[in-house]
């Protein structure tokens, strides 16, 4: 755990420092978010936060290779993590070009598919699905590749859609990355296997990169992550989940230290948990696609009806809307992790209290909101 904490801190500190450089580069190259009708910022803000986060991930990877415990892990741990970082750099480059020249949607989609294809080429993909009582269902190569591409592309675009308020995407993905780290680490510990897991390494670094970026990105933001950052975060989180699938056999998974038998939920945990962590951005993506399709528009046509826009409409300030969405993301992500690995009144009591608090803050507080000096015109 101490080495993972160090990985987290290295990613956070390096991202924090590199953000200053990334901001200067963005200003000099003209990669600046101008004010548009659908945007929430009122002054131009530079992009390229993704470059700083990529630097944080790379720094964490380099340090991890030298740590006493992680350096002795199986060769595939760092090999797979390295593949993910190269794919992340590739998709970050696509985002940088978009931040500079505003690429069309099909070109960005092509870059996302290319990055997903790179993962598949080096065997970072879905391999099989556990079937309770029957062993493993191995996907044909073509179906596994297609499912991997769909997962990566959907995750990348879900994160991109939720990146609408200062600090929102970085916070949601940071919370999700920490929850997924807890899942990977505890799943390995409960099953008595090595704690050096690629998913844990990547999610620890990803969580650190998000935390390091937030001081520069929280309202009022001095730097935006841009597509270089949102696509980077989406790919890194999706790839973290891909590296975990196939690591645990269906008979190995236990719940709270007890054998879970043929129960469907525990055997599907490596698939369910990553999806649950992304419920908030995926919900926003799904609602946006349905909403725009019903209006006869393309799914990527922008509007101001995302979840974060609705939070502002019901009376929340910018900062409070972001914090509450973080709470929802944490409730779903950590709730799935705790509920799947542990049981008992303490766990369920904690989750119920978290749910009640989040619901009250979401729907009750705006009714009694006074004048908030942090509120900007919505």
Image (spheres, grey):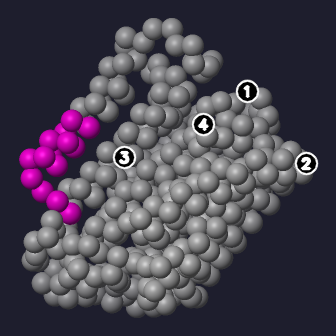
Q: Where is mark 3, residue-wise? A: 330
89 relative position to 186: left or right? right
Residue, disc 2:
28
Nearer to us in this view, 281 or 352: 352
- In primary-sequence order, the first of circles 4 and 2 is 2
Q: CA distance from mark 4 to mark 2?
A: 23 Å
Q: Which residues are magenta?
A: 341-354
Write the residue at 65% across / 50% down: 16
In this view, the mark in front (1 or 2): 2
The quadrant in which residue 196 appears is: bottom left
Q: Upstream in the sequence, badge 1 or badge 3?
A: 1
Q: Which residue sits at x=57%, y=40%? A: 167
- Residue 314, position in %: x, y? 45, 21
The image quarter containing residue 93 is bottom right
Q: CA distance from mark 1 to mark 2?
A: 20 Å
Label 1: element kind: loop
User: Where in the figure is residue 323, as x and y percent of width and height?
Assistant: 46, 34
User: Of circles 1 and 4, which is in front?
Assistant: 4
Q: Is residue 353 magenta?
A: yes
Q: Quadrant of residue 54?
A: bottom right
Look at the picture and state if 141 lies above or below 278: below
The quarter of the picture where the N terminus appears is bottom left
Q: Which mark is residue 306?
A: none
Q: Is residue 93 above or below residue 86?
A: above
Q: SS class of the residue under badge 2?
A: helix
Look at the numbered disc 4 and give the secondary structure of its residue. Answer: loop
User: Residue 218: which numbered mark, if any?
Assistant: 4
Q: Which mark is residue 42?
A: 1
Could you tell me how far apart the alpha carbons at marks 1 and 3 are, in whole angstroms? 29 Å
Whether residue 53 is visible = yes
Q: Residue visible at 62% across and 54% down?
A: 13
């Amino acid at each position: 755990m101490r080495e993972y904490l160090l990985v987290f801190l290295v990613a956070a500190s390096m991202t924090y420092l590199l953000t200053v450089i990334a901001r200067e580069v963005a200003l000099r190259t003209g990669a600046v978010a101008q004010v548009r009708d659908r945007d929430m910022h009122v002054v131009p803000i530079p992009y390229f936060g993704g470059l700083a986060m990529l630097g944080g991930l790379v720094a964490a990877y380099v340090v991890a290779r030298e740590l006493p415990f992680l350096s002795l892990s199986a060769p595939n741990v760092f090999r797979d993590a390295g593949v993910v970082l190269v794919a992340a750099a590739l998709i970050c480059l696509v985002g940088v070009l978009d931040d500079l020249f505003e690429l069309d949607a099909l070109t960005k989609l092509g870059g996302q598919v290319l990055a997903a294809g790179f993962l598949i080429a080096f065997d970072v993909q879905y391999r099989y699905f556990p079937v309770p009582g029957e062993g493993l269902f191995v996907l044909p190569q073509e179906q596994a590749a297609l499912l991997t591409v769909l997962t990566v592309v959907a995750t990348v675009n879900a994160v991109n859609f939720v990146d609408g308020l200062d600090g929102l995407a970085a916070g949601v993905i940071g919370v999700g990355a920490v929850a997924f780290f807890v899942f990977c680490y505890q799943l390995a510990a409960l099953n008595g296997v090595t704690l050096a897991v690629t998913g844990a390494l990547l999610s620890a670094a990803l969580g650190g990169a998000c935390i390091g970026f937030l001081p520069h990105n929280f309202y009022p933001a001095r730097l935006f992550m841009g597509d270089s950052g949102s696509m980077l975060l989406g790919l890194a989180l999706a790839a973290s989940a891909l590296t975990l699938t196939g690591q645990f056999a269906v008979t190995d998974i236990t719940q709270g230290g007890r054998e879970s038998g043929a129960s469907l939920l525990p055997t599907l945990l490596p698939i369910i948990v990553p999806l649950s962590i992304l419920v908030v951005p995926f919900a926003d993506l799904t609602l946006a696609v349905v909403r725009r399709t019903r209006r006869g528009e393309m799914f990527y046509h922008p509007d101001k009806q995302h979840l974060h826009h609705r939070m502002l409409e019901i009376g929340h300030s910018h900062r409070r809307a972001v914090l509450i969405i973080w709470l929802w993301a944490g409730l779903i992500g950590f709730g799935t992790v705790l509920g799947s690995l542990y049981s008992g009144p303490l766990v369920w009591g904690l989750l119920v209290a978290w749910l009640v608090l989040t619901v009250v803050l979401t729907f009750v507080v705006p009714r009694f909101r006074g004048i908030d000096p942090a509120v900007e015109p919505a």
